[in-house]
Image (cartoon, coloured by chain):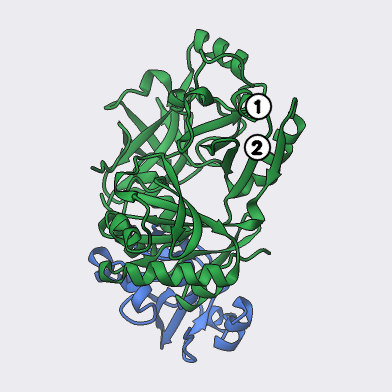
Amino acid sequence: MVFPEDLKYTDTHEWIKVDGASATVGITAFAAGELGDVVFVDIPEMKAVALGDNFGSIEAVKTVSDLVAPVAGTITEVNPDLEGTPEIVNTDPYGKGWMIRMTIANPADVDALMDAAQYKALIGK
Amino acid sequence: MKTTPFNDKHIAAGAKMVEFAGFSMPIQYQGIIAEHKRVRSTVGVFDVTHMGEFEVRGKDAFAFVQRMTTNDVTKLEAGKIQYSSMLYDDGGVVDDLLVYHCGDYVQLVVNASNMAKDFAWLKDHLSGDVQLIDKSDETALLAVQGPKSLDTMLKLTDLDLSSLPYYHFLRGKVAGIDCLISRTGYTGELGFEVYFQSDPALGSKMWDAIFEAGKEFDIAPIGLGARDTLRLEVGFCLYGNDIDQTTNPLEAGLGWITKLNKGDFTGRDVLLKVKEQGLSRKLVGLTLEGKNFPRHGYDIIVDGAVAGVVTSGTVSPMLEHGIAMAYVPSALAEPGSVVHVRIRAQDVPATVTKLPFVVKQ
């Protein structure tokens, strides 16, 4: 299982890739594996979110899981490919299966997140 | 944690293993949807060794089982199987189970999660010349399910499986191993369940033989995840979800295995009263449209108030929409009635649907 070094991670199994004042967010390979076959990603609207807010949900065959904002900011884009091909979350969780792009309101939020080694320790990998 | 004789096979096949009822069991291999469709289209193999097997022997064995279960054991004959349930005195369900008439004794097959409870319950009610023997640890069980299951199994045995009716069994050699093989399963498909001695060498031999025989049908191992979606599509109850000690078999739609006229059995008095008073709620199938997927525990809403509960729910891999089993008020139990399911604070319409959701030939 892969956990790219250039990403930051949350204890609710999101990853975030920071690019200046904005970022891309998705769920980790571990989360996708635990969920199993993803059939629907529900991210209702593009809006401002606080750190730790639920910004949507992921429906898998077996269960449903909340998506949690890793930082405060404003959602600017939802991955349009999730609607027709939600399975990209399972097949390419760090690439095609990204969830949202957002602005980062408070850069300090990013510093509080885990790096790949810390995340791997959290999930026992 | 216990392991089954097929543990190495699961790991070699890339299974994701989870703890279930004290066993390390495969929840999925390739993914629930692919596995589910494999069983519906050709053939898949489930390790269900965790299920419990009890033998009931002695002069009074059949009378004992008749008293402890809801279906009518006197209707059974050697080689036949009955779906049945065991009740508490108050009519709540101890477990649902299979009753095998083995000539001079009875085999009961019970849910893994209830095995210890069931054994203790039966033991506490023993009377007359009855011996209750737990054979679970000595018994391996594979379920071979799907339209190509017969073609697969015929390659491995001289037994006349082609003419074996549903809910009947035979004894003989499969892949050279002594077995009890029954035409039963939890998928709604043509299928067989193969019981044999739990032993790693025999298990490995049986597993390899079945997979070799099914190769031309793209046979695949199937995990507990797809087992659940397969049974839900055909409306089979799961103990702990749809039935438990707080539900009675009549409201759960199990009236057809509850023979109130067969004579006395545990729980009968209460059920007679329940029947006379009428059922306040019934277990029904629900269909939801769009991307609304019901889950175990979600509330059923009628006129803005909680009026029931979803006991099992998922997205149907074959129908590609939400399906559920739920308890609803009896007045709304007819197919076509509409209730609402509360899905994350939204009340979504759901139509009562005749079970099974997926109809098989």
Residue B64, numbered label:
1
What's the residue type where badge 1 is placed? Phe
Q: Residue at x 59, y 35 (%)?
A: B104
User: In the rendered image of this protein, does residue B246 appear above or below residue B263?
Assistant: below
User: Could you say which quadrant of the image residue A57 lies in?
Assistant: bottom left
Mark found first going from the N terminus, 1 or 2: 2
Q: Which chain is blue?
A: A
Q: Which chain is green?
A: B
The residue where tag 2 is placed is B56
- Quarter of the picture containing the C terminus of chain B is top left
Disc 1 from disc 2: Cα separation = 9 Å
**Label 2, residues with CA under 10 Å away: few <14, some 14-19, many ≥20:** many
Q: Secondary structure at mark 2?
A: strand
Q: Residue at x 40, y 25 (%)?
A: B303
- Can residue A106 be seen in this snapshot? yes
The reply to whether callout 1 and callout 2 are in contact (CB within 8 Å) is: yes
* Chain of the residue under the numbered disc 2 shown in the image: B
* Chain of the residue under the numbered disc 1 shown in the image: B
Q: Is residue A50 left or right of residue B36?
A: right
Number of on-image labels: 2
Provide residue B140's location: percent of width, then percent of height: 56, 58
Provide residue A37's location: percent of width, then percent of height: 38, 65
Residue B139, numbered label:
none
Provide residue B2's location: percent of width, then percent of height: 66, 63
